[in-house]
Amino acid sequence: MIKESASGFTLIQWLILPLLAGSMLYGSFPSDNPTDSRKGESSIENYVPEIQETISESDSINSLPNIIYYSDSFNGANDTTSLKNRGYKVFYRGTGPQGLTASWFQGSSIVFPAFNGSSSGYVAANFNAVTSQNNIDNWLILPSKNIVKGDSLFFFSRSIFRFQISGFNKSNVFTNR
């Protein structure tokens, strides 16, 4: 027979209660979740990829880590024509007529400065790409590249909304192009 304490809890309940309370609080502190995925924010500032390695023509590109296969700083012209000339696919897929501006355009230092490089060195999109009667559905798709298992994609984005990428692992899953 288990003896009850003055509060009515048994010894086993007193041992289990802290475990349950601890598991319910896990993830409630910033140190438990440094990227704060619940809010789409990150405490990891100014991420810099690991050291790059130089390879020779005889090396297999897929066997060496930390090789930059493709890079675009967006420090040049970023109007629709320039993006297409660099191999990007630019799509507007809204439900109505396109608005006053292009779906993707050169960034402006008046709105906010670029992450690095020239102050307007970024590509931008905003609500002016649509009219008040339709939804925003602009697509900027990277130039076609051959990728293999284990490759990574790093980029910076800025938005008042949480940016979310689903775990798709097939090509052509977004646009059928």
Image: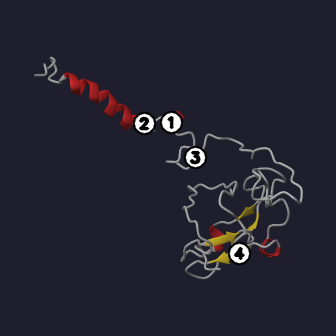
* Residue 41 circle label: 3
Quadrant occupied by the C terminus: bottom right
Q: Secondary structure at mark 4?
A: strand
Residue depicted at x 72% and y 43%: 46
Q: Are marks 3 and 1 in contact (CB under 8 Å)?
A: no
Which residue occupies 72% across, 75% down? 89
Question: Image check: 170 left or right of 26?
Answer: right
List the single residue furthest toward the bottom.
Answer: 97
The answer for how far apart the CA atoms under marks 4 and 3 are is 27 Å
**Contact check, label 4 and label 3, Cβ < 8 Å:** no
Dot 2 amino acid type = Tyr
The Cα atoms of the two marked residues, 3 and 1, are separated by: 14 Å
The residue labelled by disc 2 is 26
Q: How many marks?
A: 4
Q: Which residue is mark 1?
A: 32
Q: Which residue is mark 4?
A: 90
Residue 165, by quadrant, is bottom right
